Image (spheres, rainbow, N blue to C red):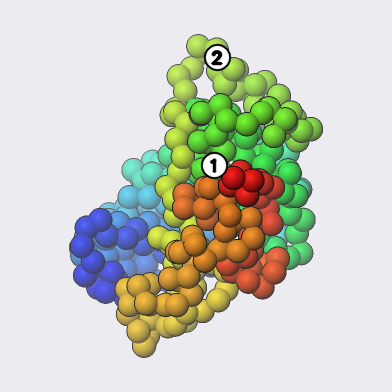
Amino acid sequence: MLDDLASLEAPRPIVVLTGGDPFKRDDVAALVAHGNGRGLAMAVSPSGTPLASASNLEGIRRAGARTVSFSLDGASPATHDAFRQVTGSFRWTVMGCRLARQAGLRVQLNSTVTADTVHELPALLVLARELGVSLWSVFFLVAAGRGAALTSLTASETEQVLHFLYEAAPSLPLKTTEAPQYRRVVIERSRHVGGEGDFVGPLHEELTAELRWLVPESQGSARAPLATSRRPPLAVGDGRGVVFVSRRGDVAPSGFLPLHVGNVRSTPLTDLYRQSPLLQAIRDPDRLGGRCGRCEYRRICGGSRAHAFAASGDPLAEDPMCPYEPRLASG
């Protein structure tokens, strides 16, 4: 599969070895070295366990990995360990981030937002800054698989969190996963489109007040330089620049959209990505239904196909987690 991906012209894909825990494979460094030797950008996503050790992290860095990503879903052991259902996971994850930095690896931090974890987002941002992460990826819970047992945000709450992230973005480079409407938020806020009432609410007020208290420079203080400017993240998502390959070789638009389009044991991944009818449909904004199909932002957003499928069984339906009413609908 790595050789197949390496046959593509530059820029070649980023390959993320995830799991489970990729460090449970004895050959993970060999896989990284093979992909790196073929010109692929190789990354590893370890679990927060004792296997995220200095020797393992240094081993994948020597093999050619440049980035690792860890999941941290709460700013305290109580929240994160309860979410992951493993006592000690918070401590191991924080230590893994620090050891990765010491090994010379860039660190991405992934945080899942649910009704139970959303209130810790400002403190998580502060922790991410302290750990020196290069990118904070905020995942919006898809009510599928084990996620169905957790409580998602409402569409209104999701919108409020996205506006909070817009205000937090200068403090730390960040992106969203399964919330592509963040691109609309960035564009509209930067152009001063829409009114303040479009996003003001108790959750937004709580998060922004906490952010200003924890990160004073977010409200204009010169205490410390801000990390980045606000820019819309890349327009990639389920099946659009991203695919997921399971340990059995089954290919899906993403790990949150469990619709298999083929298997790499029988068909090259590059062929599946180009030729799958489902992936072609997902990448065609004119085939989207409901509000997503009418939306003026459908080509740069397209809605979360995973949220659409989880709610309706139709991966081309409108995204129920976006409350935006398209202006094109009224001309």
Of residues 31 and 175, the one nearer the viewer is: 175
**In the image as oriented, which residue stretches furthest toward the front?**
331
Q: Is residue 164 above or below residue 61?
A: above
Residue 55 visible to an observer of this rendering = no
Name the disc covering residue 184, or none.
Answer: 1
Q: Is residue 297 above or below residue 7?
A: above
Q: Estimate the x, y position of residue 75 in percent, counting from the top left.
A: 66, 40
**In the image as oriented, which residue stretches furthest toward the top?**
222
Tell me the distance, in whole angstroms, between the alpha carbons under discs 1 and 2: 24 Å
- Three-letter amino acid code at the position of disc 2: Gly
What residue is drawn where x is 67% and y is 67%? Answer: 310
Q: Quadrant of the N terminus?
A: bottom left
- Three-letter amino acid code at the position of disc 1: Arg
What residue is drawn where x is 42% and y is 47%? Answer: 234
**Local SS, label 1:** helix
Dots 1, 2 in contact, CB < 8 A: no
Q: Estimate the x, y position of residue 31 in percent, counting from the top left.
A: 31, 68
Of residues 148 and 156, the one nearer the viewer is: 156
| Residue marked by disc 2 | 220
**Local SS, label 2:** loop
Instruction: Give the class, few, some or many, for how many residues have Cα within 10 Å of label 1's Cα (few <14, many ≥20).
Output: some
On the picture, is 45 further left or further right than 93? left
What residue is drawn where x is 59% and y is 17%? Answer: 219
What residue is drawn where x is 28% and y is 69%? Answer: 5
Residue 305 appears in which quarter of the rendering?
A: bottom right
Name the disc covering residue 21, or none.
Answer: none
Q: Estimate the x, y position of residue 28 in percent, counting from the top left.
A: 37, 67
Residue 196 visible to an observer of this rendering = yes
Q: Quadrant of the C terminus?
A: top right
Instruction: Give the class, few, some or many, for how many residues have Cα within 10 Å of label 2's Cα (few <14, many ≥20).
Output: few
On the picture, is 1 further left or further right than 167? left
Please tell me which of labels 1 and 2 falls first in the chain: 1
